[in-house]
Image (cartoon, grey):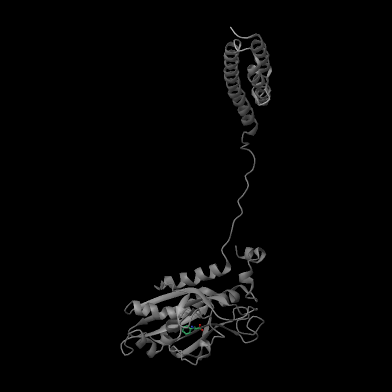
Amino acid sequence: MGHPRVDAMLREAREAVAAARSSADLEQVRVRFLGRQGVLTQLLRSLGALAPEERPAAGAAANEAKRELEALLEGRLTAALEVERRARRAHERFDLTLPGRRPPRGALHPLTHVHDEIVAIFAGLGFSVVEGSEVETDYHNFEALNIPRDHPARDMQDTFYLSESTLLRTHTSPVQIRAMKAQRPPVRIIVPGKVYRRDVADMSHSPMFHQVEGLAVDRHITMGDLKGTLELFAREMFGPGSRIRFRPSFFPFTEPSAEVDVLCFVCRGGGCRLCKQGGWLEILGSGMVHPQVLKNVGYDPEEVTGWAFGMGIERIAMLKYGIDDLRLFFENDVRFLRQFA
Ligand code: PHE
């Protein structure tokens, strides 16, 4: 059956398909015969010009030819793609003898190292870790800690206020208040965290830095317990030969108060650049919890006593690693950070 023009075209198409060597060749054949300007497409379009009695037979033949050609191309294309996929695979096979590429390895930030070390020392002594909120109320940050209304720390110049009664905590001490309000003595906690002060960044100032607060409250807690605890801390942190000394100081929330120095571990007290010839390095503020603070949280100062300290993590890290510019911790220069890997 058929139609002479359709039959001729179909023969030609079959030959072209047989001659195709790749999926790209087959695509060319498809375009040549079945594309918008393709031979068969044009032939179908020209049927309208035939005499009405010739049209049905020619139309049927052309449609039949179209279906046959589509099926033929489809089959050949599937086979060609499979062959090409295999060839590509053979080429791409993994070379298991190639050396691997090591993933770049990160490292802990020096402040994280020091933070972890401090926490581990106190955890070993039975202290639990508590984290407060960086957004605090004026009451917890100042009022409950016995810091008077006219204290300079409460000045807008020194504190980031969020509203009249809320602020970014200026120290970790407000967590003393929250922890004591949340539980009955005995209390043994350390509180690591970020604190904020309105300082312009320079070698020794940063508007954000880190502190660790320590607090122990129980019956019969004395300043001797504080000294013993901090002596042990210094030996763990700065080496077995470490010595500390207490200097009388003042904080509104402790009485008596003391600043604690560690014997300079570079010159062993002789005087050097690190300790600025003084022989001692200041590491923290501390004292016996003020009776008024105990009352503020509902504890009876006749029944329980306690001590507290607060130290700066950056300060400890600077001393330990001999870093002389605080800004290095926050600039994230990998050449600096890599040294602590
Ligand atoms: N909160 C004090 C400060 O930031 C440090 C401190 C804590 C002192 C606990 C005594 C007791 O300077």
Residues 260 and 47: in front is 47
Up-down relation of residue 132 to residue 305 (above or below): above
Q: Is residue 239 visible?
A: no
Residue 276 x %, y %: 65, 85
Q: Quadrant of the C terminus?
A: bottom right
Up-down relation of residue 339 to residue 187 (above or below): above
Residue 228 x %, y %: 44, 81
The answer to which image quadrant residue 324 occupies is bottom right
Q: Residue furthest top?
A: 1
Q: Is residue 315 left or right of residue 256?
A: right
Residues 332 and 190: in front is 332
Up-down relation of residue 19 to residue 109 (above or below): above
Q: How many marks?
A: 0
> What residue appears at the point 60 percent right and 75 percent down from the top-left corner?
318
The answer to which image quadrant residue 185 occupies is bottom left
> What residue appears at the point 57 percent right and 81 percent down from the top-left corner?
198
Q: Is residue 154 visible?
A: yes
Residue 191 x %, y %: 45, 75
> What residue appears at the point 67 percent right and 64 percent down from the top-left corner?
335
Q: Is residue 286 left or right of residue 52?
A: left
Up-down relation of residue 116 to residue 248 (above or below): above
Residues 209 and 69: in front is 69
Q: Residue furthest front?
A: 52
Q: Quadrant of the N terminus?
A: top right
